[in-house]
Image: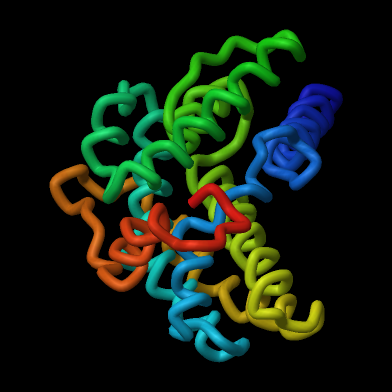
Amino acid sequence: MAMVARLGTIMRTDLLTLTQWLSPAFPLGSFAYSHGLEQGIADGAVHDAQSLQIWLTETLCFGAGHVDAVLLCQALQGADMADTACALAASKERWDESLAQGTAFAETLVTLGHQARPAALPVAVGEAARALSLEPSEVAQLYLHAFASNLVSVAVRFVPLGQSEGQAVLAALHPIIAEIAETAPTTPLDRVGTAALMGDIAAMRHETLDVRLFRT
């Protein structure tokens, strides 16, 4: 019984560790990136809670959300996904966003006594999570939630949306996040790609936006 209790405590502690890694307080600089959403807002494609939910749903299901979840799970399960992550980046800004945050993530973990290497963010998180007693789907679920939370925060500040509207959008995304996270660990790499064309094109156009509050 004591051993079972100890294992349960380790798992709970590992969940808290992952929550810390993916919280807004962890110094990744995520607040500076909009993943092309700033361009979508400037174009009028995202202008209220409903259009934001549609944009984020497509991003999660057909864009970087699904791709990142698979990359994370592959990395967690022992595969080297560094080059694959680079190849799957839909644009230079997307790659800069992922690598910069992954590098900041790894550097912070090293200062906390963990082993980590700079890589695209989902790869860096997946590799670091090998040390945690958590299922890949659990890690992917929290990763996607943090990703979506950051983009909701962008919309709250820039559309602008009310805080309650933003939280309602995030809550509506929970079943989608859970479904993607559940299938990501068994999704083969030859089934991975992006088809969120509006979001990808917006990310490419963002670097020429006249007034930019976000880096991407």
Residue plotted at (59% across, 71% down)? 174
Residue 35 position within the rendered picture, expressed as x and y whole percent measured from the top left: 48, 56
The one of 194 and 199 positioned closer to us in this rendering: 199
Q: Quadrant of residue 114?
A: top right
Residue 103 position within the rendered picture, expressed as x and y whole percent measured from the top left: 54, 24
Residue most extreme to the left: 190
Q: Is residue 183 visible?
A: no
Residue plotted at (63% across, 17% down)? 107
Q: Is residue 140 above or below residue 17?
A: below
The one of 48 and 144 positioned closer to us in this rendering: 48
Residue plotted at (80% across, 32% down)? 13
The one of 6 and 73 positioned closer to us in this rendering: 73
Residue plotted at (31% across, 35% down)? 85
The scheme the figure's colours follow is rainbow
Residue 175 position within the rendered picture, expressed as x and y whole percent measured from the top left: 54, 74
Determine whether, in the image, residue 128 is placed left or right of residue 112: left
Q: Quadrant of the N terminus?
A: top right
Q: Is residue 58 above or below residue 194?
A: below
Q: How many marks?
A: 0
The one of 194 and 7 positioned closer to us in this rendering: 194
Determine whether, in the image, residue 214 is placed left or right of residue 118: right
Residue 133 position within the rendered picture, expressed as x and y whole percent measured from the top left: 62, 30
Q: Is residue 202 visible?
A: yes
Determine whether, in the image, residue 183 is placed left or right of residue 20: left
